[in-house]
Image (cartoon, grey):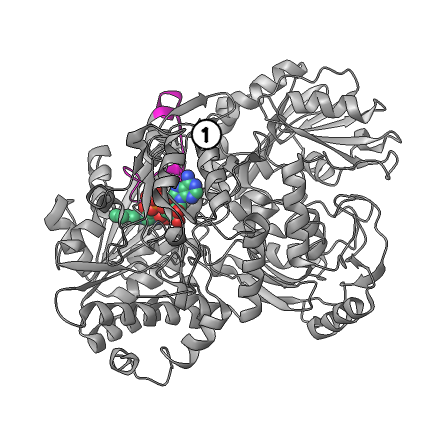
């Protein structure tokens, strides 16, 4: 389990006094301190890491959030924000001596403006709910994480989440106009605005993907896009993973920017087929799902071109969804692929590296080889058009040493991504999980710069401390000890103890 | 294209020396946008020698380029592969560089439909005020490791560091482009621009020159044809219009009076002001030529949820950019301090307080 420097905490403070102070402005039920009631908050979507928080608060108004923050600032108590806890990097993992601030009650859509094409929402609103509310106006919110029925817009902004449609329509950072933020000392500020830009530094760029470390988001204004006239999806089957990966680059190079271009390998295809009966070709080594959207005639034309190209690049079969039902079924298979793969083993560990598109074939081959070396199966389901990999490592935490082996396998994959010019995280964030691998991607001076940015927003370092950015000192230890690259894969667990 | 040179080491030496001697620097690319922002003092640090395309792989839709590279080179290299910088940055002179383009963060008519400079930044290498060479982001499409510091450079007017190189996401040139124009009033133009932006059309420009509404469509021939049927109007030979709008070289921009750039929600009503205006960005960017007191312009724009920049002309020692709320100014000062503790770079150029 990664560790970072110790942080300040509630250990030193008088619990009854603090609870009393919180209950001055929060209803009794909105302050939770009993262990059993705290248990549901002990982890996010990366459940391998768990920690019961010191206390949970569930404020309902912005004013209450300000009061919570100002109180914590006064007592110097760390705070971890939590949306729907679908995060996959332990970003919302609580601290034993910190407060967990749940935004669950901020679940109202405040306004949909069909003329301005914006939605003003509270941070706890679910991603999909925005598109549903905008649908009557022929509009939608483009970034669509596969977890969209559950994850919140606050979590999306904090992680700069992506989704199937981000290839064409951008990530969260490209679709957010304004944020209302409570500062670590309890003041409400506004970053960005309803216009397309604002004076001064681009603070929206920094807030998106800041993993709850710079401020508490209490309101979000997002852009809405017009629903395309038509969307059509192709399913291309391949008998070879490398060939499928190579075809991804060819489509983009042909000047077609699909609305989504996703890949699933054989293991993932079969798991999804068993789970939701999407109608996938279960004998394929890999499939590509390629969605084209636009005007009616344009879609027909691009579908034809993409289809020819895929066949030319070695697809054994290319199907066009016959109707909307089939299209939805094709996507349902993809969107439920994580839980589907999850049924194949007691536990799975989802990775999130990004590589240049052209390196996809070799990286997938290398992941296959690592899977054999570590003796752990891996399924690949991912945003191929963006080069954003999601290897799902299957393991059994109850078998001694397997979690450790899965972690080491994952670490190898991430370091491989960095080596080929990519990154350790494309959309899930660093959180608690990838803190070690940050040391591989960044120099000490770069990490120091991140810490200075953090301190500019949060001088007392109270928000989500210990996550996302490792201490350079900790990296020096990590580089020399745990991840000595001379240790052959598979030997690492033993070497590290 | 190969006549590039890497001056990272030399530039770093200059920064270290300036830090040692407590000397301020004015970061200078081609000087085409030197008028923009507040005047700054400091010894000019020429970036334009640090030039050349570092990597460009058309299939990956990514170009990494040194900050001093002329923008014209970049656009030529891209065009020869059928690609473009999707944010249509204005050159405002032959010598415009990539670094200046990023630092000023100014985007052209395509901005509301495809994105701004900041939207296409994938990574950057910078020298901070301590003389550290730092790399943020990268050449991949998605990257959330660490704060998005590369994107922060867009529009920072060189106040946070010397940008050494930038990686941009690029896009294919549209297969076809055409412009439809028709006469109408300003309220009609605003209503129409907002209506069209809410429809699934391949829009790439929407402006109103005071007399006529111009809509540009870009994309596959089929999509553009379908859009044309939907919108109607006269098809003009208006490539030049968009080029001139992008370069602010239309007659409208020639006035000796102060030129204001108002950034407002596209759906904001017409301004309560009779001075000459040119509407771009589907109504979200309104150019105003006006002698009115700055305060009244700023108040008017604030009411609409926007902000006003004294883009060109007027006296340059007054506020250029819209004043920030106090908490935001404090944050700006702390960020400046975080990157450039001695205040070496472009002191006062963005805000006198920085
Ligand atoms: C099955 C599955 C599929 C997924 N698919 C995708 C995908 O396709 N793309 C993708 O990008 N991600 C995906 N994820 C990951 C996850 O859903 C996203 O990261 C999501 O944005 C997290 O939202 P959340 O509300 O659950 O946030 P949480 O997990 O509760 O929190 C995430 C981070 O945000 C911070 N945070 C939350 N709310 C706030 C706030 N109001 N203010 C400040 N900080 C806050 C937390 O402190 C934490 O650091 C998937 C997860 C699962 C389980």
- Evaluate whether residue B14 shows in this view: yes
Vertical arrangement, residue A159 with respect to residue B13, above or below? above
Q: In terms of image quadrants, where is residue B81?
A: bottom right
Q: Which residues are magenta?
A: A133-155
Q: Position of residue B35 (x, y in %)?
A: 83, 45
Residue B30, located in which quarter of the rendered image? bottom right
Position of A88 with respect to A189 (left or right) is left
Image: A78 above or below A435 = above
Taking the image as shown, residue B63 lies to the left or right of residue A389, namely: right
- What count of labels does the image hold? 1
Tell me residue A302's x, y (percent).
Answer: 38, 44
Q: Secondary structure at mark 1?
A: helix
| Rendered-image quadrant of the N terminus of chain A | bottom left
Label 1 environment density (alpha carbons within 10 Å; few <14, some 14–19, many ≥20): many
**In magenta stretch: residue A140:** yes
> In the drawing, does residue A7 fall left or right of residue A328?
right
Where in the figure is residue B340, as x and y percent of width and height? 70, 58
> Residue B279: horizontal and vertical position, in percent?
68, 26
* Residue at horizontal 51 percent and vertical 35 percent from the top: A179
Picture quarter with the C terminus of chain A: bottom left
Mark 1 falls within which chain? A
Check the image and report above or below for A450 versus A13: below
Q: Is residue B74 visible?
A: no
In the displayed image of the protein, which residue is found farthest to the bottom?
A486
- Mark 1: C-beta under 8 Å from nearest atom of ligand 1: no
- Identify the residue position indicated by label 1 in the image: A62
Between B15 and A331, the residue placed more toward the observer is B15
User: Looking at the image, which residue is at 16% across and 51% down?
Assistant: A340
Q: Quadrant of residue B46?
A: bottom right
């Amino acid at each position: 389990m990664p560790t970072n420097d110790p942080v300040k905490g509630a250990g030193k403070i008088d619990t009854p006094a603090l609870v009393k102070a919180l209950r001055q402005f929060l209803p009794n039920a909105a302050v939770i301190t009993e262990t059993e009631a705290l248990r549901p908050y002990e982890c996010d979507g990366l459940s391998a890491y768990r920690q019961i928080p010191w206390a949970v608060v569930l404020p309902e108004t912005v004013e209450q959030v300000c009061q919570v923050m100002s109180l914590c600032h006064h007592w110097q108590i760390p705070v971890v924000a939590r949306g729907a806890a679908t995060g996959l990097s332990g970003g919302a993992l609580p601290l034993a001596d910190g407060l967990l601030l749940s935004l669950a009650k901020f679940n109202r859509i405040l306004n949909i403006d069909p003329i301005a094409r914006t939605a003003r929402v509270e941070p706890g609103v679910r991603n999909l709910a925005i598109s549903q509310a905008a649908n009557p106006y022929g509009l939608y919110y483009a970034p669509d994480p596969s977890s969209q029925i559950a994850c919140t817009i606050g979590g999306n902004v904090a992680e700069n989440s992506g989704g199937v449609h981000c290839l064409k329509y951008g990530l969260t950072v490209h679709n957010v106009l304004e944020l209302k933020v409570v500062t670590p000392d309890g003041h409400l500020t506004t970053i960005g605005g309803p216009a397309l830009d604002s004076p001064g530094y681009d603070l929206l760029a920094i807030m998106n993907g800041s993993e709850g470390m710079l401020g508490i988001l209490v309101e979000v204004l997002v852009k809405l896009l017009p629903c395309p006239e038509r969307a059509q999806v192709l399913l291309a089957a391949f008998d070879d993973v490398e060939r499928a990966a190579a075809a991804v680059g060819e489509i983009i190079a042909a000047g077609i920017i699909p609305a989504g271009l996703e890949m699933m390998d054989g293991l993932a295809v079969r798991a999804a087929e068993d789970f939701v009966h999407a109608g996938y070709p279960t004998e394929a080594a890999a499939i590509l799902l390629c969605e084209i959207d636009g005007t009616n005639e344009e879609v027909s034309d691009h579908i034809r071109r993409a289809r020819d190209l895929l066949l030319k690049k070695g697809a054994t079969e290319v199907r066009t969804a016959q109707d909307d039902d089939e299209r939805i079924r094709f996507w349902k298979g993809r969107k439920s692929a994580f839980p589907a793969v999850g049924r194949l083993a007691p536990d799975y560990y989802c990775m999130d590296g990004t590589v240049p598109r052209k390196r996809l074939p070799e990286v997938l081959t290398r992941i296959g080889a690592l899977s054999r070396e570590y003796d752990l199966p891996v399924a690949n389901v991912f945003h191929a058009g963006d080069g954003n990999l999601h290897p799902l490592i299957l393991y059994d935490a109850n078998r001694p040493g397997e979690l450790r082996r899965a972690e080491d396998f994952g670490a190898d994959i991430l370091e491989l991504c960095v080596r080929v010019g990519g990154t350790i995280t494309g959309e899930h964030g660093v959180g608690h999980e990838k803190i070690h691998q940050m040391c591989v991607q960044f120099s000490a001076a770069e990490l120091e710069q991140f810490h200075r940015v953090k301190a500019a927003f949060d001088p007392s370092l109270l928000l989500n401390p210990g996550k996302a950015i490792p201490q350079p000192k900790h990296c020096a230890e990590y580089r020399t000890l745990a991840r000595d690259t001379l240790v052959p894969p598979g030997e690492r667990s033993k070497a590290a103890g | 294209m190969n006549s590039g040179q890497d001056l990272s080491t030399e530039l770093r030496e200059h920064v270290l020396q300036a830090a040692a001697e407590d000397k301020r620097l004015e970061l200078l690319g081609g000087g085409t946008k030197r008028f923009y922002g507040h005047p700054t003092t400091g010894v000019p640090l020429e970036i334009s020698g640090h030039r050349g395309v570092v990597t460009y792989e058309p299939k990956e839709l990514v170009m990494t380029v040194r900050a001093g590279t002329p923008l014209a080179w970049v656009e030529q290299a891209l065009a020869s592969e059928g690609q473009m910088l999707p944010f249509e940055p204005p050159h405002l002179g032959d010598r415009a560089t990539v670094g200046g383009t990023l630092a000023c963060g100014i985007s052209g008519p395509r901005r509301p439909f495809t994105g701004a400079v900041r939207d296409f930044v994938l990574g950057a290498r910078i020298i901070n005020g301590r003389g550290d060479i730092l790399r943020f982001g990268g050449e991949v499409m998605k990257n959330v490791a660490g704060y998005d510091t590369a994107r922060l450079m867009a529009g920072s007017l060189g106040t946070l560091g010397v940008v050494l190189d930038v990686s941009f996401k690029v896009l294919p040139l549209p297969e076809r482009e055409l412009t439809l124009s028709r006469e109408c009033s300003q309220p009609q133009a605003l209503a129409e621009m907002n209506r069209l932006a809410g429809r699934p059309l391949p829009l790439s420009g929407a402006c109103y020159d005071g007399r006529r509404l111009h809509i540009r469509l870009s994309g596959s021939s089929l999509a553009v044809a379908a859009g044309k049927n939907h919108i109607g109007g006269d098809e003009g030979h208006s490539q030049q219009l968009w080029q001139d709008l992008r370069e602010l070289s239309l007659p409208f921009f020639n006035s000796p009076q102060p030129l204001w750039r108002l950034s407002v929600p596209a759906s904001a009503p017409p301004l309560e002001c009779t001075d000459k205006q040119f509407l771009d960005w589907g109504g979200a960017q309104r150019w105003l030529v006006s002698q009115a007191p700055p305060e009244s312009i700023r108040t008017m724009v604030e009411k609409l949820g926007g902000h006003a920049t004294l883009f060109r002309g007027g006296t340059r020692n007054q506020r250029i950019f819209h004043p920030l709320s106090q908490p935001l100014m404090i944050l700006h000062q702390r960020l400046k301090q975080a990157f450039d503790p001695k205040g070496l770079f472009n002191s006062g150029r963005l805000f006198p307080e920085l």
